[in-house]
Image (cartoon, rainbow, N blue to C red):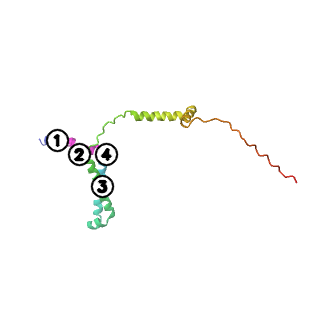
């Protein structure tokens, strides 16, 4: 009978653990587990430094590494407790975003820019529309070119 009682108690404990939201959060959340491990290791290192040679009160006051370990442990515990208080992070399937007007305008603008860059005729039409048509003219000079100076003046 004792074996049946132990098995029943173990089954009840397993069912209670399965239904416990905090335990489920610890199982599912990698960051929470990492914070708990960091907190435990820092606390263990702080405890070993506290009992390392000198009196514990002197270590508490003077040991900078002990202070760093205690701070690291406290920070990790704070992060873990705040993560436990937050709503569970469900891995909901991501929704597909629909196109929308913004995406359509962006694609149209991108297509227009590519077309202008690649087509010289279209580029000329756009420049003419923006800045006016270029006037084509032939340049003729009114001045006559200067006569070349003679190399040596006559004496």
Disc 4 vs disc 1: which is toward the camera? 4
Q: Earlier in the sequence, mark 3 or mark 2?
A: 2
Q: Is residue 31 visible?
A: yes
Q: Are marks 4 and 2 in contact (CB under 8 Å)?
A: no
Other residues around mark 2 within 10 Å, as few (<14) / some (14–19) / many (≥20): some
Q: Is residue 22 magenta?
A: yes
> Which of the two residues, 105 or 33, is positioned nearer the viewer here?
105
Give residue 126's position: percent from left, percent from top.
54, 34
> Which of the two residues, 122 or 31, is positioned nearer the viewer here?
122
Q: How far is disc 1 from disc 2 in space, using C-alphas?
A: 17 Å
**Residue ID at (25%, 48%):** 85
Q: Are marks 3 and 4 in contact (CB under 8 Å)?
A: no
Q: Which residues are magenta?
A: 10-31
Tell me: 5 left or right of 85: left
Q: Which mark is residue 22?
A: 2
- Report helix, strand or loop for mark 4: helix
- Report helix, strand or loop for mark 1: helix
Disc 1 vs disc 3: which is toward the camera? 3
| Quadrant of the image containing the N terminus | top left
Q: Earlier in the sequence, mark 1 or mark 3?
A: 1
Q: How far is disc 4 from disc 1 in space, using C-alphas?
A: 26 Å
Give residue 139's position: percent from left, percent from top.
69, 38
Would you name the residue on which mark 1 appears? 12
Q: How far is disc 3 from disc 2 in space, using C-alphas?
A: 20 Å
Task: Please tell me whether residue 89 is drawn above or below residue 108 in the rendered image.
Answer: below
Q: Which mark is residue 30?
A: 4
Q: Which mark is residue 75?
A: 3
Q: Which mark is residue 83?
A: none
Give residue 46's position: percent from left, percent from top.
29, 60
Other residues around mark 4 within 10 Å, as few (<14) / some (14–19) / many (≥20): few
| Magenta segment, prevailing SS (helix, strand or loop) | helix
């Amino acid at each position: 009978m004792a074996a049946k009682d132990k098995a029943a108690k173990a089954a009840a404990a397993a069912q209670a653990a399965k239904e416990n939201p905090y335990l489920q959060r610890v199982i599912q959340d990698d960051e929470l587990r990492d914070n708990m491990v960091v907190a435990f290791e820092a606390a263990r290192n702080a405890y070993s430094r506290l009992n390392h040679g000198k009196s514990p009160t002197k270590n508490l006051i003077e040991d900078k590494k002990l202070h760093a370990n205690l701070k690291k442990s406290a920070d990790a515990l704070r992060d873990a407790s705040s993560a436990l208080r937050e709503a569970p992070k469900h891995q909901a399937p991501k929704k597909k975003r629909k196109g929308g007007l913004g995406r359509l305008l962006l694609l149209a603008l991108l297509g227009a820019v590519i077309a202008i860059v690649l087509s010289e005729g279209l580029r000329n039409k756009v420049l003419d529309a923006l800045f006016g048509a270029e006037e084509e003219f032939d340049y003729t000079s009114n001045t006559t070119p200067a006569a070349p100076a003679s190399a040596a003046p006559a004496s």
